[in-house]
Amino acid sequence: MLVIPCPHCGPRDEGEFDHGGPVRTLPALDGAASAADWQRALHLPAADPGPMRQLWFHRSGCETWVEVTRDPSTHCISAARPAGAAGGGS
Amino acid sequence: MAYSGLSVLAHAAAGNRHWPSAFPAPDLRPSYDIVIIGGGGHGLATAHYLAANHGITNVAVIEAGWVGGGNTARNTTIVRSDYLLNASFGLKNFALGLWADLSRDLNFNLMYEPRGYVDLAHSDGELEHFTLRANAMRLRGAGAAILTGAALQERVPQLDLTGGKRFPVAGALVQEAGGVVRHDAVAWGLARKASAAGIHIVQNCPATGFVIESGRLAAVETPLGRIACGQALISVAGASGAVAAMAGIELPLQAINVQACVTEPVKPALDVVVNYNAGLSYVSQTAKGEFVLGGATDGYVSHARRGSFARIEDALARAVQILPFLSRLRLMRHWSGTADIPMDGNAIVGRTPVEGLMINAGWGYAGFKATPATGWCLAELLATGRVPVLLAPFALDRFETGAEVDDAGIGPYPWLH
Amino acid sequence: MIDRNTVIGFTFDGAAMTGHPGDTLASALLANGRHLVARSLKYHRPRGILSAGLEEPCALVTVTDATGATPNLKATEVPLTEGLAVTSQNNWPRLDRDAGALLQAGGAALAAGFYYKTFMWPRNAWHRTYARHIRRMAGHGQVDPTPDGALYDKRRRHCDLLVIGGGAAGLSAALTAAQSGATAVLIEQDFRLGGALLSSRESVQGLAAAEWAEDAASALGELSNVTVMCRTLAFGQYDHGLIQAVETLSPSSAARAILWTIRARRILLASGAIERPIVFPGNDRPGIMLAGAARLYVRRFAVAPGRRAVVAVADPGERTDTLAALDEAGIETAAVLAPGDTLVGTSGRLHLTGLRWRDASGKRHSTRCDLLCVSAGWTPAAHLAAQTGDGLVFDAGTRSLLPGAGKGALRLVGGARGVLGLADCVADGKAAAHEVMAEMEMHKHLDLPRPDPTPAPEGAFAAGKGKAFVDLQNDVTRADIALAGREGYRHIELTKRYTTLGMGTDQGKTSWTNGILEMAALTGSDPTGIGHTTYRPPYSPVSIGALVGAETGMQMTPVRRTPFHAGFERLGCAFQASGDWLYPRYFPRDGECMAEATARECRAVRGGLGCVDMSTLGKFDIQEADAAEFLSRLYCNDLSGLRPGRVRYALMLREDGYVFDDGIVAQLGEAHYLVTATTARAASVWRHMTKCAAVDWPALDVTLTEVSDHWAAMAIAGPEARKLLLALAPDFDARREAFPFAAVREGTLGGDLPVRVFSVSFSGEVSFEINTPAGYAGELLDRVMEKGAEWQITPYGLEALDVLRIEKGHLSVGTEIDGRRVPGDLGLGRMVSAKKDFIGRALLSRPALQAAGREQFVGLVPEDGMTPIPYGALLCVEALDDTGRAEASGHLTASVQSPTLDHPIALAFLKDGGNRMGEVLWAHSPVAGQSVRVRVTPACAYDPKGERLHG
């Protein structure tokens, strides 16, 4: 059971959150992006080894999205911040 | 020497001192026709059928760890083909046919037991959908039945169908040909047969890179040296993303942790595989007497092969709903595997943008049951260059064309599949 | 430590026996002269009691108490209580004459993996014949099939320091930390604190060891910042320092066991060490016992486990101590063996009667004995440290697997890191406690020295040739391990799986280190290179009842009830579990079955007036300047024409272009919207919306509020619906001209009942969805029923709701919106706006999603106009062939007898269905044994022009 350091609520049990997948930088909805742009952005999230940025929704807490940087090999969490606050997406 | 009751007795008389190695460690050659990366069930089945169906034996299977040590070693051993979509049904039902004779084909007892797979529905609406699935199976030549009430109770006397349950059981889809296969034996039997045919199986030998010349695969790099090859297959389950990346291929999947557990062994108390569907919990009893249970994934990406205990608690709570006596047993061991789950929850099998390099990935936690069929079809692809009909729906480019094969209809959220 | 003044009665295989408080089942059995207590798993060999703790591989029994029978309990860890009925396992007809023992005659033919090599002929014989027999032979105890009446619970605990293990190191650590002010929890799997202190004659800090333990225990009891939990097994370490433990309660407690979830800032693992048996021929007979266990039985339990003993203990100090213990119990010592001696064999059928050995000079010896105390050394019980992936490393000095320094919250102390002497353990506990206290900044750093791990005894016992067991529970012999190596199963994971070494209920606690040493010896390799298999929780088996806790029956997951629940209950509603919800299903009147009630409810809606609970829909309040832009991006249809007071049906796609959900968008004010989601997708749509707003489009000025639970929602539907609405006295103009279809009004009913009313319809009739703050739900229901009585208002449920929507060809999530459909498949292609960008637009344009011939949503009627269409059928052009097969070109999503049209109708997906109107097909349901000719129609079977909406 992970302990996720919610930037609003403090360290909280994983069970309070819904997982929201990797941070994906989706194209802007300005009519310009092609299917290929969207397909890459949606289907091919970065698979680099090492820490990855993921979204968690603090369902049983502040009901906000949190961007958590976690190493999938060790489950160590190195950062957590409000998602989308800066550079979280398009 | 062939395995048989007689050979067991003969060897026993000689103190078992003369059994040969089932898969002797070969000296790696500098070049092969085909290199299969990944010595799990799928990779070994591909090797076996290359030899058995196509006479191709200049093949190396390289395995980063030990034979059958990935998801082949970690699944809950269930085989079945109760799928609605043609693509999913086709491959898994073909596999079910192969499982029935594979022990004798391999001369290795894989302990296939068609004990029956019982998929529980918890509302009339769900049962209606199960009926659709059962009908689809029947029209395609597979056996399936819908059982309710007394008939279900008679088929599975251990099921607690009394009231007072959070999600009552409305009925079940039963596939009698579904059942269990001894998972480790699958890897060993395939490895032994392929090995006997002259295929090299090299353990502790990870792929560390690919040599690609003008878009065509030339060689696979390993710590034991470069292996030149005409074709290669990546069949590495949880490591798919990382290995494909070495060839510059991005895969639309995520590696997610999935857990399972066993109880202490007891005398036979359940002779079918039961799947509880209000939340997920699948239960069967092994030949040794342990109850083996699995549940939903942990959701998040993980390569740690461990997960949250809450998932185990959840799977147990759901199993106890239908088999209350389980609460008297004790949990003996629980473990994890890394399930590579694509954006539509279905496998990615076939060609890649690199000519000569094939991919077999994305089986998530549903790969074991497809093992022989996938191997059969991949062997055909590697041997003939033609994509077998059963594999066509699983092409990597389906995400670009919009031909996803999404059994659950969940969409591009692997953590929800 | 044993209360001889009180006698406890119990039975073993029906024979009455007695013991005393303080006994374990094992000590009581031994005191009653019972050594043979079990049969082994594979060969049914007689087995006794090897150990005195949870490492016990042999003495598995079934214990029956008032709550039923529990199989596979280790006699060594069950405290004796009055009236226990203990039975032996895995034997027939009885323990001392077990027919299964004939298997031993199979000998080498039953070696490791023999079953992979045979039982293959004829086809299916494995399943039909062999597996059935093997399954009957396998397994240990019998599970009690009756429901488990015991209660279980789950609880949580937080502390500064968790100490796992109440032996010398653990007691010392807990005392040190607690006296420095830390909140500490000490857990001990035994029912008494003390561990090895309880069987030692050493003195610790000037006190006899057992006295020191008692002093420490009472000191801890005095401290308010310490919680001591005995009979509590810490079975797993999980991510981020989580410890899971199960506390087994005494029979007098209300609950049988509790699952504890413990989070501590620091964890000290003081779980001690496990003694290692000697692998030699015949080493499994009852009467052969670990030396440490023998000392414990003598000194803690006052039991003499034999009359005439041989001692084969590697460590000289322990050898002397064992001899002393035997002497204290009046047990005669027949011989003392030392490393360098070769154990050749044992004799005895059901109990040890003699031992044969050779000394270092090769001279043969033998003696009569009924007890053999063995010890090859100790293995640290560091499992919890290894469970999170930090491997253990074979250490040549201690000849055991030792953990590294330890990362994260958990540190090892005492025997768990190979420190064996009691004084060293006490010192180690104190030093470790100081270390972690300093880390937590609760104490200055004293930097006390940590004692080194105790080196393994010099030299080892040798063993002769013959059946020597490495894993006593799974009957894995040295020959099996050799065979596995010979056959290529050399990697330790393969050896384990091929031989089943360490895979029993003891999880190899007494066999793993020996197994590694055997493998090393066989291959002449360094044990360091062999590694070990992954350590997995639980450390020792734990009760599934405890892991489930109180989450059984109706309590498995919470039930959501709508605000109308109590009111509907009074109206005689039959409810149905649907996802999280308990939803009104139908309202039977006297003697009606569900179908009859549903048909009546449908007719009432079509012909008069009905009311239905819509509270489970997701409801989201969207506000601020960019709300319109936000919704425009979110939904695929054009919302630009929407005005305050108006409502529009809206379709939401996933990013990949498939239909995700449908609902309504109601504009309440200039920059104020209320949108709904289907019940099934309410949570995921909310996540999707919030993620879009917060993560993808942070620049948009929009505020989202989840108001699903805030509003109770009831739809009144039917030709008389508007009359009822007017009768409810709204304070807004609710006449048809002023409040047309697809509009929303806010106000009150009767001047005092706050409402929002939406003129939207799922049934196809005039319909008003009245939302009121949840607390007013009862009042709304009362008024609707009271005023509606004039038009015989009929409450209806999920079933009628479904029939009505099927008649109208409306979509339902799960059946039609199944995650694989694009708008065009559902007949909604024209809704997709070409004038704007929105989620799903780009990927919806992919060729396969635009291809001709996709499955499309259609209706069906029976060709003969009357034959019911079997639900779950597939649509085929052809009749079934001789083998019962046919190629399908579509499938049904719903099928009902329409009470309105008075004939069967169905909905379906059909390949290219839009172009196949009027075509006659087969609807095959082999499961139902029915094939019906059906004609393809538009999906909407009733009032296709929607004229009834505007009444």
Image: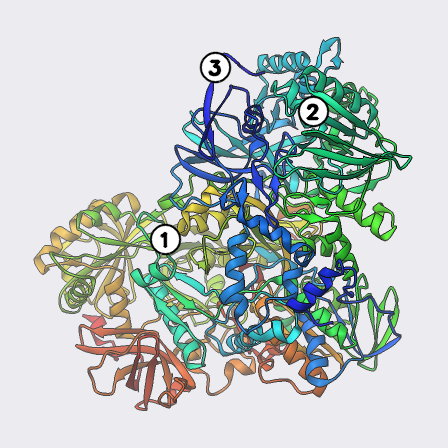
Q: Which residue is mark 3?
A: C6
x and y percentages locating residue B149 in the rendered image: 30, 60
Q: Which residue is mark 1?
A: B167
Considering the numbered disc 2 on the image, is that residue within a helix, a strand or a loop?
Answer: strand
Viewer-side residue, C675 vs C496: C496
Q: What chain does badge 3 belong to?
A: C
Give the distance between the C-alpha atoms of the residues marked 2 and 3, in whole angstroms.
Answer: 29 Å
x and y percentages locating residue B170 in the rendered image: 33, 60
Give the mark toward the camera: 2 or 3.
2
Side (left or right) of B1 relative to C722 = right
User: Which residue appears farthest toward the top when viewing the image?
Assistant: C206
Viewer-side residue, C618 vs C160: C160
Establish if C924 lies above or below C385.
below
Instruction: Answer few, some or many: residues within 10 Å of disc 1's Cα (few below 14, many 20 plus, some between 14 and 19).
Output: many
Give the distance between the C-alpha atoms of the residues marked 1 and 2, in whole angstroms.
Answer: 61 Å
Q: Residue at x 45, y 43 (%)?
A: B327
x and y percentages locating residue B102 in the rendered image: 61, 73
Q: Which residue is mark 2?
A: C308
Give the distance between the C-alpha atoms of the residues marked 1 and 3, in whole angstroms.
Answer: 49 Å
At label 1, which amino acid type do we have?
Phe
Considering the numbered disc 3 on the image, is that residue within a helix, a strand or a loop?
Answer: loop
At label 3, which amino acid type do we have?
Thr
